[in-house]
Amino acid sequence: MKYALVTGGSRGIGRAACVRLAQMGYHILVNYVNKTDAAEETLELVRQEGQDGELLKFDVSNLEQTRGAIEAWQQAHPDEYIEVLVNNAGIRRDNLMALMPAEDWTTVLQITLNGFYNVTQPILPAMQLHKFGRIINMASLSGLKGLPGQTNYSAAKGGIIGATKALAQEVARRNITVNAIAPGFIKTDMVDGLDEAALKKTIPANRFGKPEEVASLVGYLASPEAGYITGNVISINGGLYT
Ligand code: NAD
């Protein structure tokens, strides 16, 4: 059995990634933090693809909780390991820097950047031992270009891009690839409240992207065919950024 863990798998891009990886034959570990119903729905979609999976509840920003859940899973599956890790969990708390409460700065960094450490660090040794792994980090256009009103989010996603490039070089010899995906505007709960009609005029493709389009890229980066792509950031943004 091949295992893939998707953080923040209960909805949006994470859910679509779970379904795509299930189509590729993976047993899916759906991480979620509080909405059990939504995570169960993802699992149901995974089962409709003829695969199975399980729910792993932990808050990626909480080191103890995350490590505890991953170690418990590893102890329960001594002969198995997580071959594909999608670090997808993330939030945004937009504000101009001059008005940004410290909590909004810290929380966004805790979930995106510390979350990357908290999940990846305990999973990496088994990938190294088995000499195969795929780590896919959900960055953002905001982390490449910087977006006003998102200093916290741009810093977190920019940090993820740096971490992706560094880790890729540490583990390449072990057949482990580490890449980041930088989506533009994708139609999920995260963009609720944005003025889609106005924003899409700024996008050459004249529309927001779909979670499934990002998930296809996740699937490609997870595949054996993508073994020579590592340390990269791949944009998926309808031509918005070059
Ligand atoms: P979303 O809000 O629908 O999904 C975010 C997921 O992360 C949810 O499942 C949520 O429960 C989970 N999550 C949040 N905090 C968590 C925590 N502490 N522990 C575990 N899970 C947690 O939004 P989405 O668009 O599907 O976002 C997925 C990823 O894509 C995020 O990293 C986001 O920053 C990135 N992204 C999204 C867009 C976009 O336009 N939607 C653009 C660029 C990047």
Image (tube, helix red, strand yellow):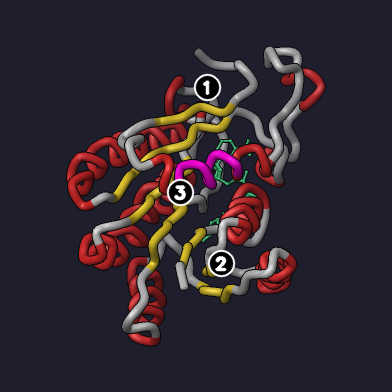
Dot 1, crowdedness within 10 Å: few (<14), some or many (≥20)?
Answer: some
Part of the protein shown in magenta: 216-221
At horizontal 38% and vertical 39% (from top left) the residue drawn is: 179
- Can the viewer see residue 9? no
Give 50 or 162, whichever is nearer the viewer.
Answer: 50
At horizontal 67% and vertical 42% (from top left) the residue drawn is: 211
Give 6 or 159, whichever is nearer the viewer.
Answer: 6
Whole-Å distance between the Cαs marked 1 and 2?
32 Å
Mark number displayed over residue 148:
1
Residue marked by disc 2: 30
Picture quadrant of residue 233: top left
Where residue 220 appears, x then y in whole percent? 51, 42
Mark number displayed over residue 222:
3
Q: Amino acid at mark 2?
A: Val
Give 21 or 55, whichever is nearer the viewer.
Answer: 21
Q: Are marks 3 and 2 in contact (CB under 8 Å)?
A: no
Where residue 117 appears, x then y in whole percent? 31, 55
Q: Amino acid at mark 3?
A: Ala
First in sequence: mark 3 vs mark 2: 2
At horizontal 81% and vertical 22% (from top left) the residue drawn is: 197
In the image, farthest residue toward the right? 197
Q: Residue 61 vs residue 188: left or right?
A: left
First in sequence: mark 1 vs mark 2: 2
